[in-house]
Amino acid sequence: MNGWWTSGAGRGSSLNRWMGRVLLIACVTWLSGCAGKAAQSFTLEMDLPADFKVKTAANYSPGTGELCTLPRRRGQRPERKVFFTEYNSVATRVSYVLPLNETVEGCPLVLRSIEFDFYAKWGARHSDVGGDIAGISIRDRLEGDVAGMPESGVQKIHRQCRWYFRTVGPVHAITKILLCRPMDSVRQPQKKGAGGVVQRHQLPGKKLRMGLTVIDEELPAFDDRWIAVPGGWKRCRGQSFEDLAAFCAGNTTEFKPIKMPDGRICDVYPTCQ
């Protein structure tokens, strides 16, 4: 065996060259792997209207084919990254760089989903706040006619928000509900509950942008409680002034006053006629 390693300069030189090539290939492969891992992240952007804030959570779990598991925990979880953006009086764009791969307690994880909790102010009081949720699923592959990453390197997901008004309590005070519906690529509403879906391998080094817009026109939160009139809406009387549900039920002549957020008692919302 010792003779095989030392028998002749020619064979030794060939062996050295072969070993050199193996080491070179190994080094290139290792460096490429490191470069690939370093690039396994993307930029998440959110376009928020004025007076909006959002809590964002990136959720990781074992990748496809991984046999490891993570223990159930309460409170903070290393497989869940949470970010907070506070209210701003003007429209803003915020961004985070999110890794697509993580290792927690020796278990290789991949990004599976992103959750958004949106909150928005509709008045000056501390309680004058509405909210809605949204989510993006990060998948190994896409099915159907789901659009992939465009050439611009920015994949956009749209949600269109609207305020819906209603009355609460014995004085029939105005309050509001925020609903944000998903939109398709040409800004047409999708089915309620539909969410964004993106493919994982298309994201490294690219941008994923969640855009919110708000429709100016408000609408009643429930059917058959309000009647449209010049200047806005009148609240149906129902069985009596004390009737909190107060369906119109075909009665378009009897109404009751409402209490505006600033304390005024009015007949028409929002113009307070």
Image: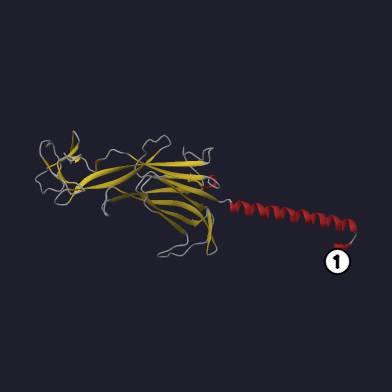
The amino acid type found where label 1 is placed reads Asn
Above or below residue 61? Residue 136 is: above
Residue at point 67%, 55% (across, down): 30
Most extreme residue toward the left, as rendered?
Answer: 240
Q: How many marks?
A: 1
Question: Which quadrant of the rendered structure holds the N terminus?
Answer: bottom right
- Judge from the rendering whether residue 161 lies leftward or rightward of residue 242; answer left or right: right
Camera-side residue of 87 and 238: 87
Question: Which quadrant of the rendered structure holds the C terminus?
Answer: top left
Q: In the rendering, at what x and y percent does residue 121 appear?
A: 30, 49
Q: Secondary structure at mark 1?
A: helix
Residue at point 46%, 44% (across, down): 209
Above or below residue 67? Residue 133 is: above
Name the image colouring. Answer: secondary structure
Most extreme residue toward the right, as rendered?
Answer: 8
Q: In the rendering, at what x and y percent does residue 57 appear?
A: 43, 55
- Judge from the rendering whether residue 192 lies leftward or rightward of residue 83; answer left or right: left
Q: In the rendering, at what x and y percent does residue 49 appear?
A: 37, 44
Residue at point 41%, 37% (across, down): 184
Corner quadrant of residue 16: bottom right
Q: Which residue is mark 1?
A: 2
Near mark 1 (Cα within 10 A), the count class, few <14, some 14-19 or many ≥20, is few
Q: In the rendering, at what x and y percent does residue 27 appear?
A: 71, 55
